[in-house]
Amino acid sequence: MAVWEQYYNEQTMEVQVVNGICVETPMTRRQWLTLHRAR
């Protein structure tokens, strides 16, 4: 819910589109959860 979280959320969405599923991209559990939470 923080500003950096929202900013990172947009970046993760872009990365997901580029990689398709963003699986090969090294991500921590927190980032992974944020990515799915955004969806």
Image: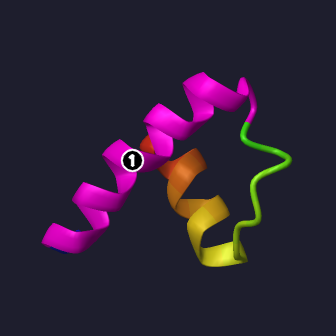
Q: Main secondary structure of the magenta part?
A: helix
> Residue sitting at 61 percent across and 62 percent down?
33
Residue 39 in sight from this viewpoint: no
> Residue sitting at 70 percent across and 67 percent down?
27
- Residue type at mark 1 is Gln
> Residue sitting at 46 percent across and 36 percent down?
13
Residue extending furthest toward the left: 3
Q: Quadrant of residue 22?
A: top right
Spot occupied by residue 35 in the image (x, y as percentages of width and height): 55, 50
Seen in the picture, residue 2 relative to 14 is either above or below; the reply is below
Residue identified by numbered label 1 = 11
> Residue sitting at 50 percent across and 50 percent down?
37
Circle 1: is it few (<14), some (14-19), or many (20+) Cα within 10 Å? few
Quadrant in the picture for the N terminus: bottom left
Bounds of the magenta span? 3-21
Q: Quadrant of residue 21?
A: top right
Spot occupied by residue 20 in the image (x, y as percentages of width and height): 72, 23
Q: Quadrant of residue 28?
A: bottom right
